[in-house]
Amino acid sequence: MKQTVLKYGLISGIIAIGLMMITMSLHDHIPFEMGMLIGYIGITLSFIIIYPAMVSYRDKVGGGTISFGRSMAIGLLISLVSGLFYVIGWTVVYHTMMPDYLDKYTAATIESMKKAGKNAAEISSAVKKMDGFREDYKNPVLFVLYTLMEPLPVGIIITLISALILKVKSKNNKTIAA
């Protein structure tokens, strides 16, 4: 399992970093919300490799079968490995290419809130929250945790879906064989 997790986690992580770099290169040329959408599409694409990883493990190691729990473990560990690559990529991008990212994020949020008709108190409250986030971001541990919170939920969802698909396929194959 270790070999499968490392191989596919590495592939997923490289895809995540590559797509992040493409997205960040477009950052100043597209609306902020579009950049976030493209970023999450990239994260999702990088995790699609989870299903083939589970199938590979099933076929090469499991003798054609894989349990739901083993599928979940493989997918979650691949998500974690890929997520760590994502953290490394974002750390480099944030500290070298986009040290003003939080300023731009705050400005985009304020502009969006104004367009949505939010009042000054709501905007002020949001700015205070973002200022707190900015302080949290200076702490390396919190920086890593906040950054992991972007890709991991997507990886968990794709892992669950992939494990369920394999469980259903496995159940259907047993029914046909019987």
Image (cartoon, rainbow, N blue to C red):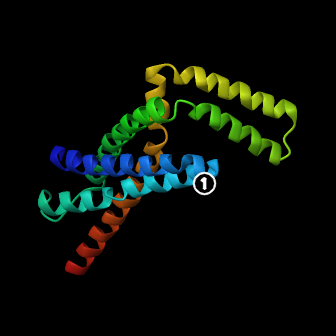
Can residue 121 be seen at all in this image of the molecule? yes
Residue 31 sits above or below residue 146 on the image: below
Question: What's the amino acid at mark 1?
Answer: Met
Residue 2 sits above or below residue 59 on the image: above
Question: Which residue is drawn at the image coordinates 47% and 45% (left, top)?
Answer: 153
Q: Would residue 91 appear left or right of 104 to someone viewing this image?
A: left
Q: Between residues 11 and 152, which one lies in front from this camera angle? A: 11
Q: Would residue 131 appear left or right of 118 to someone viewing this image?
A: left
Quarter occupied by residue 88: top left
Q: Where residue 152 appears, x then y in whole percent?
A: 43, 43
Question: Which residue is drawn at the image coordinates 31% and 64% (left, top)?
Answer: 166
Q: Between residues 28 and 52, which one lies in front from this camera angle? A: 28
Q: Where residue 111 appears, x then y in whole percent?
A: 76, 42
User: Within 10 Å of the Cα at label 1, are there few (<14), some (14-19), or many (20+) other Cα atoms?
Assistant: few
Can residue 178 be seen at all in this image of the molecule? no
Quarter occupied by residue 71: bottom left
Label 1 secondary element: helix
Question: Which residue is drawn at the image coordinates 44% and 36% (left, top)?
Answer: 93
Question: Which residue is drawn at the image coordinates 36% and 59% (left, top)?
Answer: 48
Q: Where residue 119 appears, x then y in whole percent?
A: 87, 37
The residue tagged 1 is: 34
